[in-house]
Image: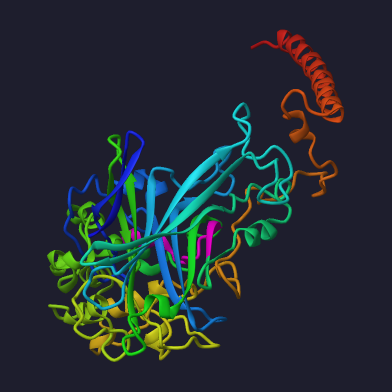
């Protein structure tokens, strides 16, 4: 089990805690509650009942790949908070302060974490008398007009049999990239994102902040599997939505057991602090889609409070999956013969000769062979299309996990060749060429401008000046007076218009 902080009455101490992993490309499940699991939540996009009501703690996706522009390093991207509507202010999207966002690494194949990177967040508000996220144009992460900010700390735990052998603070008070409020508030959001890329000791790099949701899929699969007649495919349901991302790039030799054993297993978890100050695991994620389409309702919340080394309790969900039966019932495509040992081998152990570690213990983890160099021309179906640098050997941002998983679950690996898919083959935005690779988030001001207006921003900080604390410079006071006078004049005009409307209404017959 992994370390968990217990903060009660202002005190913090280490105890053993739960370590999690998630499920695989639509094909695996896991879990036994460890220690005292609290109310378990879900991972991925609203796939379990409890976590669907707790988005700040909800893992949406996990990616792990050899860095294309730095092949001696490995990049891990973990996302939280599904379906962020870009214009959802004034309380824009923040990491939870009562959470431990953890990235687990198993480097010997025993199903237990050997390394744990923990991210914890703090929120800072400059002017609590304002309801605004920003009070003017934001040009940097330390801009006084960015009213609400977050910072985070990173801790690294080295574990053996889930006992802490070593703990160190990697960095603290790192700034988080804010939510992209809009073009008027943040005219150069890319600059803000660049400022949030932080160099860590040991040639590692970290990022935390908002990003475009990199998962591309037509989620109308839940409407009787794309409408019951495949009329509901081809629409990226996640287009235009954002997530909160944590990205970590580390030298591969820091996380791999050795050059002779380069396969690592990765998963992410969220632990939430309860009213007594203790933490319990509420979400976990390794491979995508598992908890949505593999685990039945009775197991979904339990799965999210569980750990990889206990995944055997959900084995029947993998060997006798429901999805092929549904496809057969609706589309008359024969389901492959059960038990589905092909799914167990690929998604619980890794592909033999590719990303299966020696002496592997079956466990649901996103397994990556870090010795396989990235390709200049990645194929969206990854291993199924001969590209061994892609899913299910880790997961790149461009990998089409929906199509790959559908084809495998319908028997691609046992002779039932097929080309099933959702007709969404790539993300709506291009990914970046360098860390953190995720696309910039969609801005809250998206959509057409009002008629007769332009996109210019002629005055920089009228709003910010008006909200300045008392006792500031005379120019600020003048701005406040001018703003008040303008508001008063506007009020007089509105009152006059209201009186005219009232007089007209008195003449109406109804």
Magenta includes 214? yes
- Could you tell me if residue 49 is visible in this image? no
| Residue 81 percent across, percent down from the top left | 44, 51
State the scheme by which the image is colored: rainbow
Q: Is residue 364 left or right of residue 212?
A: left
Q: Quadrant of residue 322?
A: bottom left
Tell me what residue is drawn at x 70 percent, y 12 percent.
508
Q: Is 267 drawn above or below residue 508 in the view shown?
A: below
- Camera-nearest residue between 470 and 455: 470
Q: Position of residue 268 (x, y in %)?
A: 35, 62
Give the x, y percent position of residue 230.
Answer: 39, 69
Above or below, 324 against 140 in this view is below
Q: Nearer the viewer, residue 275 or 169?
A: 169
Q: Of residues 296 and 162, which is closer to you in this image?
A: 162
- Magenta-tinted stretch: 206-224
Query: Quadrant of the image for the N terminus?
Result: bottom left
Residue 228 sits inside the magenta stretch: no
């Amino acid at each position: 089990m992994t370390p968990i902080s217990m903060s009660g009455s202002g005190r913090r101490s280490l105890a053993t805690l739960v370590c999690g992993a998630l499920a695989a490309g639509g094909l695996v499940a896991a879990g036994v509650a460890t220690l005292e699991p609290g109310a378990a939540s879900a991972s991925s996009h609203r796939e379990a009942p409890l976590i669907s009501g707790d988005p700040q703690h909800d893992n949406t996706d996990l990616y792990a790949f050899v860095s294309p522009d730095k092949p001696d390093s490995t990049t891990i991207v973990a996302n939280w908070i599904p379906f962020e509507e870009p214009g959802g202010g004034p309380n824009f999207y923040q990491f939870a302060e009562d959470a431990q966002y953890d990235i687990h690494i198993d480097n010997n194949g025993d199903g237990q974490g050997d390394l744990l990177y923990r991210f914890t967040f703090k929120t800072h508000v400059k002017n609590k008398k304002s309801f605004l996220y920003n009070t003017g144009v934001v040009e940097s992460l330390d801009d006084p007009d960015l009213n609400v900010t977050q910072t985070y700390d990173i801790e690294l735990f080295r574990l053996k049999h889930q006992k802490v052998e070593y703990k160190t603070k990697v960095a603290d008070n790192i700034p988080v990239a804010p939510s992209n409020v809009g073009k008027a508030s943040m005219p150069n959001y890319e600059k803000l994102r660049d400022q949030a890329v932080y160099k860590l000791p040991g040639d590692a790099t970290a990022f935390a902040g908002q990003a475009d949701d990199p998962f591309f899929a037509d989620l109308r699969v839940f409407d009787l599997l794309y409408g019951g007649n495949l009329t509901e495919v081809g629409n990226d349901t996640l287009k235009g939505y954002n997530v909160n991302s944590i990205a970590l790039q580390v030298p591969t030799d820091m996380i791999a057991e050795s050059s002779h054993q380069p396969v690592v297993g990765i998963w992410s978890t969220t632990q939430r602090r309860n009213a007594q100050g203790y933490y319990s695991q509420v979400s976990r994620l390794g491979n995508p889609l598992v908890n949505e389409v593999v685990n039945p309702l009775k197991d979904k919340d339990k799965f999210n409070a569980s750990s990889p080394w206990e995944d055997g309790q959900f084995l029947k969900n993998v060997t006798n999956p429901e999805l092929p039966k549904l496809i057969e019932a609706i589309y008359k495509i024969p389901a492959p013969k059960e038990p589905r040992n092909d799914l167990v081998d690929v998604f619980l152990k890794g592909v033999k000769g590719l990303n299966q570690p020696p002496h592997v213990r079956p466990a649901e983890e996103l397994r990556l062979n870090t010795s396989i160099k990235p390709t200049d021309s990645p194929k969206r179906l990854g291993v199924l299309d001969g590209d061994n640098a892609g899913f299910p050997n880790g997961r790149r941002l461009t990998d089409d996990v929906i199509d790959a998983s559908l084809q495998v679950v319908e028997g691609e690996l046992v002779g039932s060749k097929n080309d099933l898919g959702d007709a969404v083959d790539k993300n709506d935005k291009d990914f970046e060429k360098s860390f953190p690779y995720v696309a910039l988030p969609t801005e809250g001001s998206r959509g057409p401008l009002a008629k007769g207006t332009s996109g210019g921003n002629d005055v920089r900080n009228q709003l910010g000046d008006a909200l300045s604390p008392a006792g500031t410079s005379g120019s600020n006071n003048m701005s406040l007076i001018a703003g008040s006078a303008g508001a008063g004049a506007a009020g007089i005009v509105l009152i006059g218009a209201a009186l005219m409307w009232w007089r007209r209404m008195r003449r109406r017959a109804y």
